[in-house]
Image (spheres, rainbow, N blue to C red):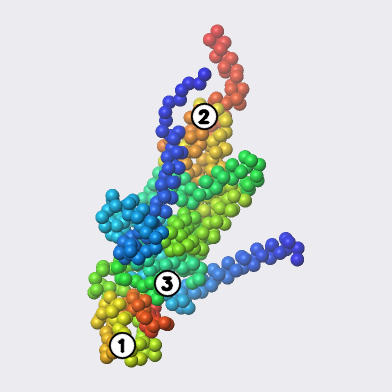
Amino acid sequence: MRRRTFMGKMGTGTLGALVAMAAGNVSTAGAASSSPLRYLRPPGALPEAEFLSRCIHCGQCGEICPNRCIKYFGIENGTEAIDTPYIIPREKSCILCMKCGDVCPTGAIKPIPREAEAILEDVHMGHAVVDENLCLSFQGKTCGVCYRACPLPDVAIYVARLEQPHVTDKCVGCGLCERSCIQMPQAIRIIPDRG
Amino acid sequence: MTPQRSFSISRHLNKLRWLSLSLVFAMLIALPCLHVYQTYVAAHAYDLIAPSEKQFYDVMEALTSPLTNDPATDLDAVKGNTWSGNFWGLKLSDPLAAVGQAAAGMTLYWPFLLTALIPIVVTAFFGRIFCGWICPANFLYELNSNLAAWLQLIGLKTGMRRFDRRIKYVVLAVGLGLSILSGSIMVAAIYPPAIIGRELYYAIAQGGFGVGMVFFAATLLFDFFVSRRGFCRYLCPGGALYSLLGRYRLVRIQRQVQTCNDCQKCNAVCEFELDPWHDGFGQECTNCAACIAICPTDALTFNLRLVDLAPQGPGHLGRQYRREHEHLDRDVDEAAA
């Protein structure tokens, strides 16, 4: 193949790929919550499609997060999610300080007062689920770490006999339980609710 | 014998501009550093962090302790970058962020759009001063083009190709179109000042540069090897928007034809390859004042006017004008005699 033909083919190939990517975006816009990745949006984030259309990728939510739990996507979650904030609770989870909503200029993350009632009302990051086959307390070894890590104990999670954890539907999905679980892999994990 | 030129502030505006660019860039480095320091303070982590982090902590503590006793809270007052920032409660955003977000959401969300109001009004009065005086990417591009100029002095070839300036308006339109189609602000990924603000934060607080830096490095190489200042001149979507907003700016540079001597230094120094020598500034001028600084006869000045002057012909101190008007001089001399 002559060099010029090769370059030409490369050019059209790249263009084709770009168009395909754009087309892919169009078809998946709004369906982005079907991402295969298990990640959370910051507390107070709007439902996924609306969040993506609001977020301007300025990075202020991460820059104000005192726990440095907010990270930013590269290209791994699709082109429309580049530079948008996410949280992997097992690595570092949200402490519900609610500063990110105050600093967000577009309201992609709603401002929510740092009070239990407001947080229970408006934060829907996800919901904790216990795997009883992995959980030490369900295997006869009293643990209770997740209950002690929870910022909303006895509201979002309560423990029964042998510190066996039970998650209520009040759970907001901050992920502190998943972060603190001493089992490997973790016996409690957040199922994201990105709307 | 040359008469002593009187001091004029406008000749020194270019130095002030470099100071402004440096301060903005320094701010983009300082804010993520302050953020990391805040997280250490918030975690009461001094005894647990590594020695190198302790050094960092001590430096930040020394810098901030005169200003605040409660860094974990007080330093939240200033956050963000030139794309969108929060300064003591005043939220400011780039007009491109406002336009891009409106396109992505297909709705007008006023609390956010109003944060771009001050920049838009300033642009309407002063033109593209964001590009010349604030843009952190312009800071690097300008250093890059200065490096290229030095390398040309010692005989190395750097890119000097020219393209059509109107390409950037197409880039703006396509970027906004893709934002509408994808429902996400796509222009943010190809707008260098937004990239620089984010990527400096990623590099300092998130452990490394992200994908945006690949794009930015490519634009630097493009400027260096293909086209001097090519990205700003021909491709930048934000530059395109600022040019449109500043088309009828009130404050613009104009040439005083009486004192111009046709030396053309203004044309040579213009980063945007405009034509001050023929009164050609147009909507692309960033009011950077480099031409004012270099003019040997102070023939370029800031004026209040909504449009450029029509071409005024050769400068009255230049050779061409004097040759064409030689007979006038002779008449004057004869009359005097």
Three-letter amino acid code at disc 3?
Ala
Three-letter amino acid code at disc 1?
Thr
Mark 3–mark 2 Cα distance, whole angstroms, equals 58 Å
Q: Nearer the viewer, residue B230 or B121?
A: B230
Question: Badge 3: how crowded within 10 Å, few (<14), some, or many (20+)?
Answer: many
Residue B125 can be seen in this image: yes
Please tell me if label 1 and label 2 are on a single chain: no
Picture quadrant where residue A88 is located: bottom left
Please tell me if label 3 and label 2 are on a single chain: no
- The secondary structure type at the circle numbered 3 is helix
Chain bearing mark 1: A
Please say if B71 is above or below B305.
Answer: below
* Residue B38: image location, x then y, percent: 33, 60
* Residue B45: image location, x then y, percent: 33, 64
Please tell me if label 1 and label 3 are on a single chain: yes
Which residue bears the numbered disc 3?
Answer: A49
* Residue B71: image location, x then y, percent: 29, 57
Chain bearing mark 3: A
Which residue bears the numbered disc 1?
Answer: A142
| Mark 1 / mark 3, whichever is N-terminal | 3
Three-letter amino acid code at disc 2?
Pro
Q: Residue at x 40, y 76 (%)?
A: A90
Which residue bears the numbered disc 2?
Answer: B296
- The secondary structure type at the circle numbered 1 is loop
| Residue B68 numbered mark, or none | none
Question: Badge 1: how crowded within 10 Å, few (<14), some, or many (20+)?
Answer: some
Mark 3 or 2, closer to the camera? 2
Residue B279 can be seen in this image: no
